[in-house]
Amino acid sequence: MKGFKEPGFQDRAAASARAKNSAVEKLKAAPKPDAAELAARAARQVEREAKEAAKRAAAREAKEAAQRAEEERLAALEAAKIQAAGLTEAERKAARDAKYAARKKRKG
């Protein structure tokens, strides 16, 4: 019995070319999707993107509402603190200006 012969470069290159050709033939033989199927895929993609956009918009609205509620809570707390302290008009104006500056800084 003969011993195992290690395949050389030419043998490996030929085997690779055969495998590539057979894969290309399989792809060529595969049925192509018809226009109705392509239209259905496009419709599903558009629907999926619309759902995702709506979900992102709802999340953004919820985040903004939570932020507004927090700002209102802090403003009410600040107003109560100022009222309790009995500050002068100039001091209240300075506190209000600081609050507005902080909000403007956060919003960028």
Image (cartoon, grey):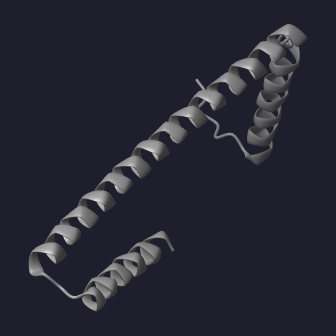
In the displayed structure, would residue 17 be above or below residue 85?
above
Q: Residue at x 64, y 29 (%)?
A: 50
In the displayed structure, would residue 67 be above or below residue 45?
below
Q: Where is residue 76 in the image (x, y as percent from the top left)?
A: 23, 62
Q: Which of 78 and 38 is in front in this view?
A: 78
Report the label total: 0
In the displayed structure, would residue 41 be above or below residue 13?
above
Q: Nearer the viewer, residue 1 or 78?
A: 78
Q: Where is residue 2 in the image (x, y as percent from the top left)?
A: 61, 28
Q: Which residue is drawn at 84% across and 13% down?
A: 33
Q: Nearer the viewer, residue 108 or 14?
A: 108
Q: Nearer the viewer, residue 58 or 96?
A: 96
In the displayed structure, would residue 93 be above or below residue 72?
below
Q: Quadrant of the N terminus?
A: top right
Q: Position of residue 99 (x, y in %)?
A: 34, 77
Q: Which residue is drawn at 10% across and 80% down?
A: 85
Choose top left, top right, bottom left or bottom right for residue 22.
top right
Choose top left, top right, bottom left or bottom right for residue 96.
bottom left
In the image, is 86 to the left or to the right of 65? Answer: left
